[in-house]
Image (cartoon, helix red, strand yellow):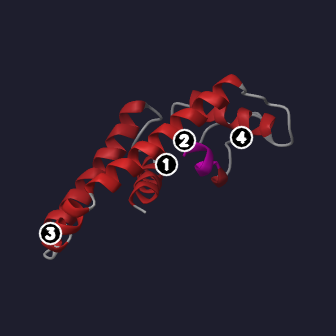
């Protein structure tokens, strides 16, 4: 659960602070959001009084943890390569999704401009595209 919660929290902080005008849409802002999540996680870990109870489990199952991480990385990179060779846009919602992704990527701040309605911003539902 740590990976999806960490990714969701980082994305939410980036989206929220960007929507409130504190961050711009850049790699530096994403890195800052990640550092905020990392700092809070480390603070929570260091203030956790019972953390020594997990250390024997980590020592016992470190091979399983490393194997699971390697399998995830291999499958993720493999699927990214498959999609890179077949970036097919034919389909129901894919042209709209590409328009939203490009609008978000090109926007300097949030909310990004709506590609279908000139002069208007994309509504609240673009958080999933930011992720």
State the CA–CA distance, disc 4 to disc 1: 18 Å
Q: Earlier in the sequence, mark 1 or mark 3?
A: 1
Q: Is residue 4 visible?
A: yes
How crowded is the residue under tag 3: few (<14 C-alpha within 10 Å), some, or many (20+)?
Answer: few
Contact flag, marks 2 and 3 (Cβ < 8 Å): no
Q: Report the side of 11 relative to 43 (left or right).
A: right
Q: Magenta region, mostly helix, strand or loop?
A: helix
Q: Nearer the viewer, mark 2 or mark 1?
A: 1
Q: Which mark is residue 47?
A: 3
**Up-down relation of residue 14 to residue 54 (above or below):** above
Segment tinted magenta in the rendering: 126-131
- Give the residue number, with chain letter if any, for mark 2: 110
Q: Nearer the viewer, residue 1 or 58?
A: 58
Residue 59: give x, y in percent of width and height.
19, 60
- The numbered disc on residue 120 is 4
Name the mark on residue 15.
Answer: 1
In contact (CB < 8 Å): disc 2 and disc 1: yes
Seen in the picture, residue 21 relative to 104 is either above or below; the reply is below
């Amino acid at each position: 659960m740590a990976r999806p919660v960490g990714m969701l929290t980082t994305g939410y902080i980036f989206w929220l602070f960007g929507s409130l005008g504190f961050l711009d849409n850049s790699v530096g802002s994403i890195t800052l959001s990640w550092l905020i999540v990392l700092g809070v996680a480390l603070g929570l870990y260091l203030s956790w009084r019972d953390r020594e109870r997990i250390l024997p489990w980590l020592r016992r199952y470190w091979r399983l943890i490393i194997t699971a991480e390697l399998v995830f990385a291999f499958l993720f990179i493999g699927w990214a390569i498959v999609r890179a060779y077949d970036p097919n846009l034919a389909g129901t919602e894919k042209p709209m999704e590409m328009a939203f992704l490009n609008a978000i990527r090109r926007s300097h701040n949030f909310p990004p401009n709506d590609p279908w309605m000139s002069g208007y911003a994309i509504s609240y539902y673009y958080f999933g595209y930011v992720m």
